[in-house]
Image (cartoon, helix red, strand yellow):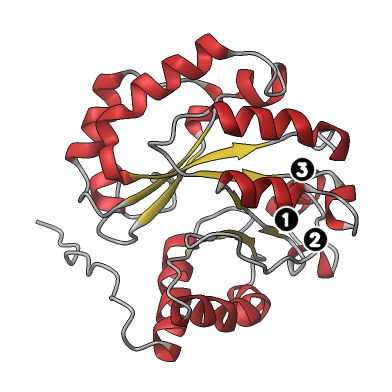
Amino acid sequence: MWTHKAWAWRGLAAYAEQCNAVEGNTTFYATPSRETVASWARQTDPAFRMVLKLPRAVTHEYRLAGGAEELRAFLDAIEPLGPRAHALWIQLPASFGPSDVPALGSFLRRLPAAYRYAVEVRHPAFFQPGTDLAGVLRETGAEWVPFDTTAFFDTPPTSDAERDAWTKKPRTPLRTEALTERPIVRYLGRDDPARTVAGWRHWVGVAAEWLREGRSPTFFIHTPDNAGAPRLAREFHAAVRAEVPGLAPLPEPEPLTLF
């Protein structure tokens, strides 16, 4: 997302002055036109990272065993992004379990090599020993996207936004292993910025270590209402940069004026 009613700006170009990566959630619900995607490309630098979610029909309705037409339309639509398509995000339903891994492997092997792929799973069995998910992902060059909600579920919710997220977000164990040179992490904090920061401290060290290893990680910082997410994302980046001074700074936005 790059627009929020609580933010002082509107649109992708303004968002790209704050952060250098964005999750493309809207593509899960509807495939945009090529013209719309071309406008996204015009508003961003080629180095800007877009992690776009595959259509719901492909991942949730056909469960990777169909939806060729929908996938083809999606790939055609996003072509104008060029290098901005940092990864295509395959978010799978919670009912997609270890017995479905062969279908995932077959699906990944059929995808065009022009893109990188990142898979998010939510079935609890994937976080227990004995599944071959990581092996299939390594074999196909795909990344495993952890959605870290451990800090969020640490204590009961205290606001309407937290209570809403409490019923919708997955409770998955912490996972910090990178499979590729481009790890992607999704993190959900709390309404209280101090608690959000406290919950991500271990990720600062992980990100710094990945950078020292030559990897290029992408982190997405969320809160239940996302009102302060861009500011917190910049704060997280600054904390990692303090550990790895060679990390390039985020863009500096133009100051807001009244005239």
> Which mark is first along the chain, 1 or 2?
2
Front residue of 150/99: it is 99
Gap in angstroms between the C-alphas marked 3 and 1? 10 Å
Find disc 3 in the rendering and name its residue.
168
C-beta proximity under 8 Å, tags 2 and 1: yes
Point 63% across, 44% down: residue? 119
SS at circle 2: loop
Q: Nearer the viewer, mark 3 or mark 1?
A: 3
SS at circle 3: helix
Q: Against 98, is 143 above or below?
A: below
Point 73% across, 44% down: residue? 121
SS at circle 1: helix
Q: Which labelled disc corresponds to residue 157?
A: 2
Q: Taking 219 as reference, is 14 left or right?
A: left
Quadrant where the C terminus sits is bottom left
Q: Taking 151 as reference, is 27 left or right?
A: left
Gap in angstroms between the C-alphas marked 2 and 1? 5 Å
Gap in angstroms between the C-alphas marked 2 and 3? 13 Å
Q: Amino acid at mark 1?
A: Glu
Front residue of 226/118: it is 118
Mark 3 nearby-residue class (10 Å; few <14, some 14–19, many ≥20): few
Q: Amino acid at mark 3?
A: Lys
Q: Which labelled disc corresponds to residue 162?
A: 1
> Which mark is first along the chain, 3 or 2?
2
